[in-house]
Amino acid sequence: MALVALRNVTKTYPSPDKNGAPVVAIDDVSLDIEQGDVYGIIGYSGAGKSTLVRLVNALEHATSGSIRVDGRELTELPERELRELRLGIGMIFQQFNLFNAKTVQANIAYPLTVAGRPKAEIRARVAELLEFVGLTEKAKAYPDQLSGGQKQRVGIARALATSPRILLADEATSALDPETTQEVLALLKRVNREFGVTIIVITHEMDVIQSLATKVAVMDGGRVIEHGDVFDVFSNPRNPSSQRFVATVVKGVPSPAEIAVLRERHEGRIVTFSFADGDASQAQVFVELSQAGLEFELVYGGINDIQGRAFGHLTLAIRGEDATTDAVLARIAERIEVTEAA
Ligand code: ADP
């Protein structure tokens, strides 16, 4: 059975205006997260991602539906048992949420101190965690003496203090520069591989999905509109709304504004071809367009790499007879995705 299993989960909040309709933050979501997954939750702001994570953490109660974590039905557990369950779920945040008046070691010790563990055990565990995140020398420093990446490493150490089986990361690298992001992602990958911790990451960053997540769920309007293997969802999103979202984060797909610029600069029809690895058909597209007597130029493009597998998008401006172009595009569209700018 899945480590985290949601079935028909709905969460509504009272309307912000007195007589308005309630806000449906989560709308009939069913999702399975298996032990060992690194599960990315993506989608536009307001899609319901944070609410979903707060439900898993039992910081909020579902309005209806079932949430099982480690076989236990959250909606039926009394508060005392929920507190215990929360110890098995670590959490890290965009703004790190460290205690600025406490040293690094006291921050990491905090969850163990609250749980009333013996002092010697706490000392040993903190030393172990400091070493794991590479901050042994900073044990006595205060958070404001650390860089953003170091702060997040403290956040990770603190989240791991009680040896949780699940780690929730809410935009944990969004406040970091690209290089520091890569360091923190590498650390999270070790948390997953070496400790077998299941990680749920809320993110709007392609880097995070690309180098960390194994599975992904796309949320929109409180619903999970698409989910599955990261490569499949990103190289070939099926739902129109997830196509729109994925296009904003993958490389090589021109935005509507960029298409407008391309139109000004290039004559002809603007057409994007999408390739996944294994398709040896890029060259074939050029051959077919040439053989039909069409003129074309490459005007936009990019390749994405997801854990060693590549997919990409090429946008061409194509000039020639409309009927001929239509026929060639239709033939190519039988093999790969072809999108003509409206
Ligand atoms: P995301 O994390 O994807 O940006 P959220 O889960 O924060 O989305 O929000 C989903 C929807 O629920 C939004 O419409 C938001 O305004 C609403 N919402 C979230 N938390 C609350 C709350 N505590 N009270 C009222 N409405 C909320």
Image: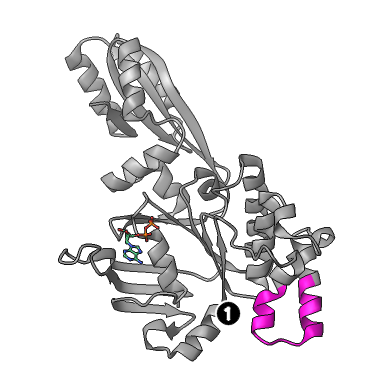
Question: Percent x, y for residue 316?
Answer: 36, 19
Q: Which residues are magenta?
A: 109-126
Q: Position of residue 68 (x, y in %)?
A: 41, 79
Q: Count numbered badges in the picture.
A: 1
**Quadrant including the C terminus:** top left
Report the image quarter containing ligand 1.
bottom left
**Does the stretch in magenta take in 197?**
no
Q: Splitting the image into 4 quarters, where does residue 264 fall?
A: top left
Label 1, on which residue?
87
Identify the image quadrant of the N terminus: bottom left
Residue 154 picture quarter: bottom right
Place of residue 279 in the rendered image (x, y in percent of width and height, measured from the top left)? 44, 35
Q: Is residue 257 above or below residue 54?
A: above
What is the magenta segment's predominant secondary structure?
A: helix
Residue 119 lies in the magenta-colored region: yes
Q: Amino acid at mark 1?
A: Leu
As helix, strand or loop, the secondary structure at mark 1 comes to helix
Residue in the foreground of this view, choosing between 192 and 13: 13
Q: Position of residue 213 (x, y in %)?
A: 53, 54
Task: Tell me if 125 is positioned left or right of 162 in this view.
Answer: right
* Most foreground residue, 99 or 63: 99
Residue drawn at point x = 66 percent, y = 41 percent: 179
